[in-house]
Image (cartoon, rainbow, N blue to C red):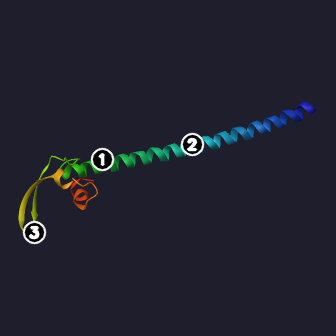
């Protein structure tokens, strides 16, 4: 009789473990699907951002770019690096492309 009791207890524990593993597997599958969906959405947003950058003339401002400015009615031609000479200045932030 003792064997039957031990056997039924072990079966019960085994069933609980199997149920727990099945539940965990389902949770992991759901999380994997959510991550894959998020990854696809992020890729769509990245591609949209790249397209927007391309529409506005490239992905990066170069310090050698020549800029034509109208400053108070006076037309000036300057290099971007001149305006970015002081990295923390307002001009640097406006013309650095960041």
Q: Residues within 10 Å of mark 2 (few under 14, many from 20)?
A: few
> Quick one: SS at disc 3?
loop
| Residue depth check, mark 3 versus mark 1: number of the one nearer the observer | 3
| Residue depth check, mark 3 versus mark 2: number of the one nearer the observer | 3
Q: Earlier in the sequence, mark 3 or mark 1?
A: 1
Residue found at the very far bottom of the displayed protein: 72
Q: Are marks 3 and 2 in contact (CB under 8 Å)?
A: no
User: Percent position (x, y) of residue 28?
Assistant: 57, 42
Identified at 59% across, 45% down, the residue is 27
Residue 67's disc number: none
Q: Is residue 6 left or right of residue 39?
A: right
Residue beneath disc 1: 47
> Quick one: SS at disc 2?
helix
How far apart marks 3 and 2 lie (CA) works out to 62 Å
How far apart marks 2 and 1 lie (CA) works out to 28 Å
Residue beneath disc 3: 72
Residue 37, compared with residue 17, is above or below; it is below
Identified at 29% across, 51% down, the residue is 49
Q: Residues within 10 Å of mark 1 (few under 14, many from 20)?
A: few
User: Percent position (x, y) of residue 3?
Assistant: 90, 30
Q: Is residue 92 left or right of residue 20?
A: left
Residue 28's disc number: 2
Of residue 83 and residue 61, the one placed in the foreground of this image is 83
Quadrant housing residue 67:
bottom left
How far apart marks 3 and 1 lie (CA) works out to 38 Å
Q: Are marks 3 and 1 in contact (CB under 8 Å)?
A: no
User: Percent position (x, y) of residue 84?
Assistant: 21, 53
């Amino acid at each position: 009789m003792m064997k039957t009791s031990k056997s039924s207890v072990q079966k019960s524990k085994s069933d609980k473990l199997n149920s727990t593993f099945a539940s965990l597997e389902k949770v992991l599958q759901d999380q994997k699907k959510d991550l894959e969906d998020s990854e696809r959405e992020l890729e769509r947003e990245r591609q949209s951002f790249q397209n927007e950058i391309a529409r506005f003339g490239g992905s990066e401002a170069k310090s050698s770019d020549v800029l034509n400015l109208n400053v108070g009615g006076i037309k000036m031609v300057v290099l971007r690096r001149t305006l970015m000479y002081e990295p923390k200045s307002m001009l640097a932030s406006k013309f650095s492309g960041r």
